[in-house]
Image (cartoon, rainbow, N blue to C red):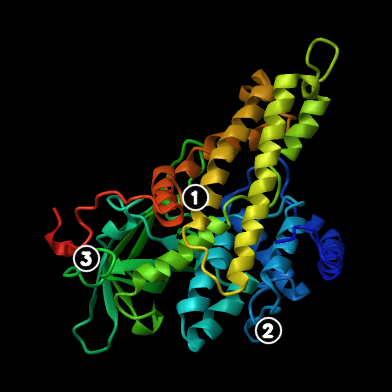
């Protein structure tokens, strides 16, 4: 893959840059300020509507579904330019565009695509992810939430169980849900995938207080929740394939296109080192920043390569895990380096300091990314086995029916 823009791509980049310069500043988030969740979500919806009205939403989706029918590389170019602005693009928007829409587009019916894609692109419909459970995190296929057919002949499904780490579930409209519908087959084969209206009776969300002080994560309880069969994606038992589509999108989307290193370069260049120079002139600091920037650029290019594969209809498979694994490690390392550069001001920030609060949040949240979307150890196993062809780990439960597992 050639990472230099072709003339056509350069023209598209210039068009995107011009449109963003005219529209993005009005939607930027205030630096270093944590807004109430409802306000942040409203800002996210407003930015999605602006993108849709301007023709910059769902770039790779067909025009008939509200997109522009462009290539993957053009979507990457726009994301790079959009990343230059501090915009409200949290999980309340990215779960819909990066997880729900890819699985609906690939596994849904024409009716489901028409029903969900355009409203999501417009920001009229937001999504959460109902995957992990208290006993099924990295081993997602061990989930125990059950769905059985209603006994009234309607074809509906009745769901009971518990999900956890459901980001923004308390504010979103719909959820993507994977449940067990057949416990008599091995754990990966008895799963079915649904979309569910979060206002359905029987759904209860309970916020989880995090170390950052925020509560965007939730426990979600499902008690006799009735889901129409029309909300099922794929056939019964094909839930794992749907999950893999979602997780590939999540991992390919790991790491914002906004650089985490470049702000630190600017800060180091403006921070005295106490001996007449700046922190950027310190050889050890400069080396660490250079390494981090090289890793960031390398990952960005690798990510673009995989997105191009997807746009061609190819499946990156476990390669997508490499993006997330590299990003999580670098995010934590860069956040720690930023804290060191700030010194005591990183811990006891001046009230007028707009940079430190974001840095503190990143430093705390970076630990989450070593687990969310696939723990480091799980991803290393997948890469070792499926990319490098190394021998697989012994799996005693591989072919055992789920209801016979202990």
Separation (CA) of disc 1 from disc 2:
33 Å
- Label 2 or label 3, whichever lies nearer to me, is 3
Mark-to-mark CA distance, 2 and 3: 40 Å
User: Which of label 1 and label 3 is nearer to you?
Assistant: 3
Q: Could you tell me which residue is drawn at 51 percent across and 65 percent down?
A: 99
Residue 299 visible in the current orientation: yes
Give the quadrant of residue 182: bottom left
- Please name the residue that numbered disc 1 is placed on: 216
Q: Residue at x 30, y 60 (%)?
A: 141
Q: What residue is shown with label 3? A: 186
What is the x, y in percent for residue 121? 63, 72
For marks 1 and 2, the one nearer the N-term is 2
Where disc 1 sits, the SS reads loop
SS of the residue under disc 3: loop
For marks 1 and 3 on the same chain, the one whose residue lies earlier in the sequence: 3
Q: Is residue 80 left or right of residue 213?
A: right
Residue 31: which quarter of the image? top right
Which residue was labeled with disc 2?
63
Pick whichever, 371 or 34, lies toward us: 371
**201 in relation to 270, above or below:** below
Image quarter of residue 231: bottom left
Of mark 2 and mark 3, the one earlier in the sequence is 2
């Amino acid at each position: 893959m050639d990472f230099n823009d072709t003339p056509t791509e350069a023209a598209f980049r210039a068009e995107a840059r011009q449109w963003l310069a005219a529209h993005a500043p009005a939607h930027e988030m205030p630096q270093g300020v944590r807004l109430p969740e409802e306000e942040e979500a409203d800002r996210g919806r407003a930015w999605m509507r602006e993108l849709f009205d301007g023709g910059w939403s769902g770039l790779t989706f067909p025009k008939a579904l509200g997109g522009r029918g462009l290539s993957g590389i053009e979507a990457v170019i726009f994301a790079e330019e959009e990343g230059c602005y501090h915009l409200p693009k949290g999980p309340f928007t990215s779960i819909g565009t990066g997880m729900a829409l890819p699985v609906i587009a690939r596994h849904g019916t024409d009716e489901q695509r028409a029903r969900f894609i355009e409203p999501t692109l417009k920001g009229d419909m937001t999504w959460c992810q109902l995957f992990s459970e208290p006993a099924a995190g990295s081993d997602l296929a061990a989930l125990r939430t059950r769905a059985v057919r209603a006994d009234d002949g309607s074809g509906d499904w009745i769901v009971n169980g518990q999900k956890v780490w459901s980001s923004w579930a308390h504010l979103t409209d719909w959820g993507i849900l994977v449940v067990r519908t057949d416990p008599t087959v091995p754990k990966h084969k008895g799963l079915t995938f649904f979309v569910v209206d979060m206002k359905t009776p029987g759904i209860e969300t309970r916020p989880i207080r995090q170390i950052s002080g925020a509560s965007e994560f939730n426990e979600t309880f499902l008690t006799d929740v009735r889901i129409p069969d029309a909300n099922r994606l794929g056939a019964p038992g094909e839930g794992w394939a749907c999950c893999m589509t979602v997780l590939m999108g999540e991992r390919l989307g790991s790491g914002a296109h906004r650089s985490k290193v470049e702000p630190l370069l600017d800060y180091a260049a403006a921070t005295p080192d106490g001996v007449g120079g700046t922190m950027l002139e310190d050889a050890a600091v400069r080396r660490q920043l250079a390494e981090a920037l090289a890793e960031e650029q390398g990952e960005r290019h690798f990510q673009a390569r995989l997105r191009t594969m997807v746009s061609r209809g190819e499946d990156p498979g476990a390669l997508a895990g490499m993006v997330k694994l590299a990003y999580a490690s670098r995010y934590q390392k860069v956040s720690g380096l930023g804290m060191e550069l700030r010194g005591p001001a990183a811990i006891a920030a001046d009230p007028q300091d707009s940079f430190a609060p974001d840095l503190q949040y990143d430093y705390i949240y970076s630990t989450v990314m070593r687990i969310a979307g696939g723990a480091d150890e799980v991803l290393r196993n997948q890469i070792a086995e499926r990319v490098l062809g190394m021998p697989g780990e012994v799996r005693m439960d591989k072919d055992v029916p789920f209801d016979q597992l202990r």
